[in-house]
C-alpha cells in the first residue's frame, strides 16, 4: 500500500505528528510519500526516519517544497 500525505502549509510539529501516525500503520512492503514545505519539518523528519531505521529518498520538487518517499525495506536508499 502507498500512503500519501500532503503537509504543505502545515507548520512543525503537525507534519511530524501526522507522519508518526502513518508510520505506525505501515507494513514491511508499504511506502509513504510525504510533501512538505515547512523548514523545521524538512530538517526534523529525516532525523526521525534515520533514528527509527526507515529508508527514504528526499528530493526538492519546487522551490521550498520537498517530497520524501519512505519505506521499511531497502528498495529505496537513504539520501
Image (tube, rainbow, N blue to C red):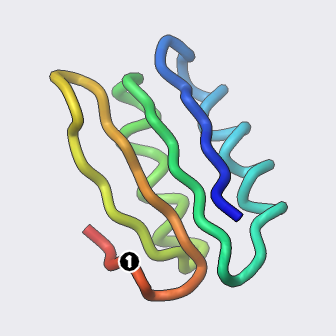
Residue ID at (60%, 32%): 15
Is residue 28 found left or right of 68 in the rendered image? right
The number of numbered discs placed on residues in the rendered structure image is 1
Question: Is 14 positioned to the left or the right of 75 in the image?
Answer: right
Say which quarter of the image contains residue 39: top left
Residue visible at 37% across and 24% down in the picture: 37
Classed neighbour count for the residue bearing mark 1: other residues with Cα under 10 Å, few (<14), some (14–19), many (≥20): some
- Residue farthest along the front direction in this orientation: 1
Q: Quadrant of the C terminus?
A: bottom left
Q: Quadrant location of residue 11? A: top right
Residue closer to the observer: 59 or 48? 59
Quadrant (top left, top right, bottom left, bottom right) of the N terminus: bottom right
| SS for dot 1 | loop
Task: Tell me if 52 is positioned left or right of 8 in this view.
Answer: right
Residue 69 image point, x, y percent: 44, 58
Residue furthest top as drawn: 9
From the top left corner, tell me how far across and down residue 33 is, in percent: 51, 50
Establish if 35 lies above or below 14.
below
- Image spot of residue 14 (x, y percent): 66, 26
Please, is residue 1 above or below residue 10 in the view?
below
> Residue drawn 41% across and 23% down?
38
> Which residue of the protein is positioned furthest toward the left in this rendering?
63
Residue receiving disc 1: 76
Amino acid at each position: 500500500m502507498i500512503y500519501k500525505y500532503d503537509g504543505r502549509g502545515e507548520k512543525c510539529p503537525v507534519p511530524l505528528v501526522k507522519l508518526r501516525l502513518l508510520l505506525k500503520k505501515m507494513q514491511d512492503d508499504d511506502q509513504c510519500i510525504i510533501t512538505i514545505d515547512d523548514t523545521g519539518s524538512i530538517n526534523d523528519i529525516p532525523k526521525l526516519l534515520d533514528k527509527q531505521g526507515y529508508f527514504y529518498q528526499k528530493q526538492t520538487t519546487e522551490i521550498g517544497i520537498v517530497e520524501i518517499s519512505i519505506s521499511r525495506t531497502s528498495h529505496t536508499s537513504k539520501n
